[in-house]
């Protein structure tokens, strides 16, 4: 029997496979992957030397732990397909955005051991953050398993209340896109003031990387770091004042709220 199987061979599945192999948590021969797209399946097989099949049921039959890495729009169909292979010995870990534990458990037959995870795309570089919540039939060791898997591609933490997964989605799930938009705006501003695109891009990327390092390593809050770099009458204060004229901080917070609301809607649909 395989130790772990993946239903879906997309980017997040590939990131997880890469991270788990790099962390030496699994060997290639202990993994099996399925996907309906032959090209995507071949890509994963060539990259990581894992077994690949077109049959989702075969993955569930052969694996002890199954990662549900298919798109939310087709998840119900996939759950119905694999339901005959579900046993109480198997653990199902879903990364389908917005799909609640209730729907996952019902789709798998009601007694399945299910853990829901909200990862984000920096997992592709081993820099992700994932939040884990376990279902009613899942055991504490199932939660620990999910945490160990996603710590192979970044950081991971557990919550007890599934309702928190919606704001998690709004903040960290969608959050990388907010940062990309901010980076694009920084670059555009530099170009408008005469910098070349190459120089503006290098300055923006390194500035963001350095700022994140300060947030994580300086031992100070964002407010304290703001105070350190903002002198009365200085350039930083001038820039911040202009940003706040457009309600920058409030707009970002509103973006998190909008994404959270959409996550709730997806969970109800």
Image (spheres, grey):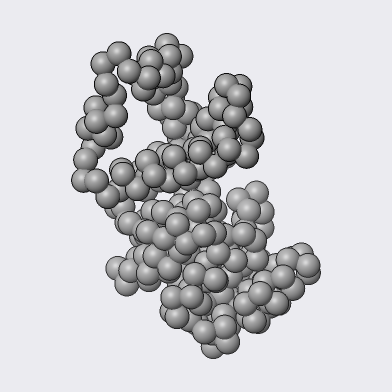
Q: Of residues 222 and 68, which is closer to you in this image?
A: 222
Q: Say which quadrant the N terminus sits in.
A: bottom right
Q: Say which quadrant the C terminus sits in.
A: top right
Quarter of the image holding residue 35? bottom right
Q: Is residue 28 above or below residue 147?
A: below
Q: Of residues 236 and 77, which is closer to you in this image?
A: 236
Residue at coordinates 58% horizontally, 70% vertically from top-left?
Answer: 6
Horizontal side, residue 156 vs residue 16: left or right: left
Quarter of the image holding residue 2? bottom right
Residue at coordinates 30% horizontally, 48% vertically from top-left?
Answer: 216
Q: Can you give x and y, in whole percent of width and height, for residue 212 in the image?
A: 37, 44
Q: Can you give x and y, in whole percent of width and height, for residue 187 in the image?
A: 57, 32
Q: Is residue 141 above or below residue 258?
A: below
Q: Can you give x and y, in whole percent of width and height, for residue 55 in the image?
A: 71, 74
Q: Farthest residue in the right direction?
A: 38
Quarter of the image holding residue 235? top left
Q: Is residue 231 above or below residue 49?
A: above
Residue at coordinates 72% horizontally, 70% vertically from top-left?
Answer: 43
Q: How many badges with numbers are in the image?
A: 0
Question: Is any atom of residue 143 visible in this view?
Answer: yes
Question: Is any atom of residue 266 visible in this view?
Answer: no
Residue at coordinates 76% horizontally, 65% vertically from top-left?
Answer: 37
Horizontal side, residue 21 vs residue 213: left or right: right
């Amino acid at each position: 029997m395989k130790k772990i199987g993946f239903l879906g061979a997309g980017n997040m599945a590939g990131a997880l496979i890469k991270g788990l192999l790099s962390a030496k948590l699994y060997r290639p021969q202990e993994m099996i992957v399925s996907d309906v797209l032959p090209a995507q399946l071949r890509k994963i097989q060539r990259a990581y030397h894992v077994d690949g099949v077109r049959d989702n049921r075969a993955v569930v039959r052969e694996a002890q732990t199954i990662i549900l890495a298919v798109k939310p729009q087709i998840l119900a169909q996939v759950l119905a397909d694999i339901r005959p292979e579900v046993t109480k010995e198997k653990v199902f870990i879903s990364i389908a955005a917005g799909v609640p534990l209730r729907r996952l458990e019902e789709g798998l037959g009601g007694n399945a051991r299910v853990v829901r995870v909200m990862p984000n795309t920096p997992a592709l570089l081993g820099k992700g953050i994932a939040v884990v919540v376990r279902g009613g039939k899942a055991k504490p060791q199932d939660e620990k398993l999910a945490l160990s898997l996603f710590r192979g591609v970044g950081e991971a933490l557990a919550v007890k209340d599934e309702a928190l997964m919606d704001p998690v989605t709004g903040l960290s799930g969608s959050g990388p896109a907010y940062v990309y938009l901010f980076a694009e705006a920084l670059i555009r501003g530099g170009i408008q003031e005469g910098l070349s695109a190459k120089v503006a891009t290098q300055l923006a990327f390194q500035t963001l990387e350095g700022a994140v390092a300060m947030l994580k390593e300086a031992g100070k809050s964002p407010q304290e770091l703001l105070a350190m770099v903002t002198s009365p009458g200085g350039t930083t204060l001038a820039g911040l004042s202009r940003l706040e004229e457009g309600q920058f901080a409030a707009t970002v917070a509103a973006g998190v709220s909008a994404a959270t609301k959409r996550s709730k809607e997806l969970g109800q649909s």
